[in-house]
């Protein structure tokens, strides 16, 4: 039987060792001061839950009662979560242990992990590089072996992006499959919470615990329960969709293409080339939605009930979205930005629906480029393009997973597998089959 | 530019605002080129409705922590200045 106390001790030592080395990864903003007592309680239980023995990090945008849900911002610097998010309750009910709150991009805005008000998260695979974002600390803490698994949130790729850069598994569940009650939102029409883990099986386990309908999040619904044993089975007659559209970095493209060929040969899966008419507009559709919804959501950060007024203490990326969102929602621009994007979002959704009538999954690189150096100068447009291949699944509401797929110059490269809405079982089976190739 | 967090001056705020508007304009311009007729999105409400009469009991600690979080408070209420927002 796994001993939670022993595992917690091991991970705390690992974190402490890293903090003292002078190369702090900066994956955690706060460690749970009650973790040891909670671990003791779990170990003393006779009938333990599904997550007993698992040590879990949580993105600082998710409410864990009594811990600091700061969103890595000065705005919520001293904000103590007054309640548990629904998914946290579910994890605690299954005896998972929360080790602490993970660093992230400020208010989950960023694709690099650099915009945190408490310093960037370093990539455990190469400390000079970004970890990716926005769930930077969640991915880095799993990659650095500071915990077993973590929770991130994904609005346009924020789970899959850092998972790809840090060489771990990250799942963006179907929109509506996991409750967001207790998540400090970026964009309610796109946000999803999901697991980051060391392998596909553990992602499936955590997802099976956190998914399901919640009265407190009206978009959630029940779907078919994940069968964890079935995930080990290699699915037959799979048709893999690959995009005609190729990314600029040929090294990444080749690595993914070779892997797809290998898996198709090994399992007898078919490959079908796909064209997507509106895919290259994903970034342009996504950002106006996020600017407007984020601006709207932040009106509550007025410094009266909690925290400080957001406009007074936020960093550049948060301000860009607030000021940009404020500007484009002015009545004189009625319909030009948000409404147009909302309508175009529907096109992407329809395009995916049609494609999934012909294929079981679509496989792409997770990120079209390798991570840059921390603090390196990069244009806003280039930064936004990091998420060009992850955003479409958020716009369409599909499920998607990033799994490690090899390395280029020692830097991990992730493969993204996208499936139709509520097809997590199939997606995890495909991902596990591909993962097995490397074992 | 780099993306590291830093305090933002009033001058930089103005630049950020202009830059954000430029980015949105360039995005909007690209979206204008879509010539396909797009329908309106509909929200299906039936499956999403909350059930009446089912509510969990309140947590006493919630109130305690909320007051702890409030920057200005009196015994049992939060103080907010009028016209400050």
Image (spheres, rainbow, N blue to C red):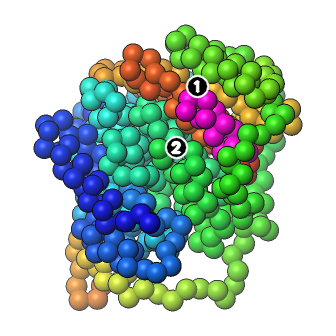
Q: Can residue A181 be seen in this view?
A: no
Most distant residue in the front direction: A1
Segment colored magenta? A426-439
> Does the magenta-highlighted stretch encompass residue B24?
no
Q: Which image quadrant: the N terminus of chain A?
A: bottom left
Relative side of A259 to A266, left or right = left
Question: In terms of depth relative to the viewer, which is nearer, A212 or A313?
Answer: A212
Dot label at residue A199:
2
Q: Where residue A398 sits: x, y (%)?
A: 69, 44
For label 2, the SS is loop
Residue A145 makes an appearance in the image: yes
Is residue A182 shown above or below A252? below
Q: Earlier in the sequence, mark 2 or mark 1?
A: 2
Chain containing the residue with disc 2: A
Q: Is mark 1 on a helix, strand or loop?
A: strand
Q: Name above or below for residue A264 compared with residue A49.
A: above
Principal SS element in the magenta part? Answer: helix
Residue wearing tag 1: A365
* Vertical position of residue A112 compared to residue B45: above or below: above
A86 with respect to A246 (left or right):
left
Q: Which residue is drawn at 60% across and 40% down?
A: A401
Q: In which quarter of the image is residue A54?
A: bottom left
Q: In this view, does A321 lie to the left or right of A175?
A: left
**Contact? badges 2 and 1 (CB < 8 Å):** no
Q: Where is residue A430 in the image (x, y as percent from the top left)?
A: 69, 38
Image spot of residue B52 (x, y percent): 69, 84
Q: Taking A85 as reference, is B61 left or right? A: left
Q: Residue at x 39, y 45 (%)?
A: A142
Q: Which residue corresponds to the image point at 39% horizontal and 74% vertical from the top-left?
A: A42
Q: Which of A24 and A244 is in front in this view?
A: A24
């Amino acid at each position: 039987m796994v001993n939670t106390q022993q595992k917690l001790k091991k991970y705390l030592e690992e974190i402490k060792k890293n903090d003292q080395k002078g190369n702090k990864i900066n994956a955690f903003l706060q460690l749970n001061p009650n973790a040891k007592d909670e671990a003791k309680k779990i170990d003393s239980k006779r009938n333990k839950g599904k997550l007993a023995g698992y040590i879990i990090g949580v993105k600082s945008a998710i409410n864990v009662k009594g811990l600091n849900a700061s969103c890595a911002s000065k705005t919520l610097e001293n904000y103590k979560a007054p309640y548990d998010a629904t998914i946290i309750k579910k994890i605690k009910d299954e005896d998972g242990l929360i080790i602490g709150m993970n660093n992230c991009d400020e208010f989950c805005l960023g694709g690099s992990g650099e915009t945190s008000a408490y310093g960037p998260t370093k990539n455990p695979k190469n400390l000079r590089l970004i970890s990716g974002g926005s769930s930077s600390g969640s991915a880095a803490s799993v990659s650095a072996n500071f915990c077993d698994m973590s929770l991130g949130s994904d609005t346009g790729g924020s789970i899959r992006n850092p998972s790809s850069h840090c060489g771990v598994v990250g799942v963006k569940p179907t929109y509506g499959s996991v409750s967001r009650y207790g998540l400090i939102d970026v964009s309610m029409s796109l946000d999803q919470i999901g697991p980051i883990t060391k392998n596909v099986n553990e992602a499936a386990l955590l997802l099976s615990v956190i998914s399901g309908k919640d009265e407190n999040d009206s978009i959630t619904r029940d779907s078919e329960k994940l069968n964890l044993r079935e995930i080990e089975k290699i699915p037959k007659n799979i048709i893999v969709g690959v995009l005609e559209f190729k990314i600029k970095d040929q090294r990444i493209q080749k690595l993914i293409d070779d892997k797809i060929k290998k898996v198709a040969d090994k399992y007898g899966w078919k490959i079908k080339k796909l064209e997507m008419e509106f895919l290259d507009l994903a970034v342009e559709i996504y950002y106006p939605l996020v600017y407007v919804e984020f601006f709207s959501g932040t009106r509550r950060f007025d410094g009266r009930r909690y925290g400080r007024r957001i406009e007074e203490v936020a960093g550049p990326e948060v301000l860009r979205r607030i000021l940009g969102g404020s500007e484009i929602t002015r009545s004189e621009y009625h319909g030009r930005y948000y409404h147009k994007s909302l309508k175009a979002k529907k096109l992407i959704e329809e395009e995916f629906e049609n494609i999934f009538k012909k294929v079981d999954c679509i496989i792409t690189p997770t990120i079209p480029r390798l991570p840059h150096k921390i603090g390196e100068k990069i244009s806003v447009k280039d930064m936004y393009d990091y998420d060009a291949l992850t955003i479409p699944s958020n716009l369409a509401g599909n499920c998607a997973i990033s799994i490690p797929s090899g390395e280029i110059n020692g830097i991990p490269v992730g493969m993204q597998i996208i499936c139709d809405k509520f097809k997590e079982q199939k997606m995890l089976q495909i991902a596990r089959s591909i993962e097995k190739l490397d074992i | 530019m780099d993306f590291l967090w830093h305090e933002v001056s009033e001058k930089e705020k103005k630049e950020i605002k202009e830059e954000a508007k430029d980015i949105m304009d360039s995005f909007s311009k690209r979206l204008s080129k879509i010539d396909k007729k797009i329908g309106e999105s509909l929200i299906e409400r039936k499956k999403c409705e909350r059930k009446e009469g089912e509510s969990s009991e309140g947590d006493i600690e919630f109130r305690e922590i909320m007051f702890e979080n409030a920057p200005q408070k009196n015994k049992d209420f939060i103080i907010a200045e009028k016209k400050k927002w």
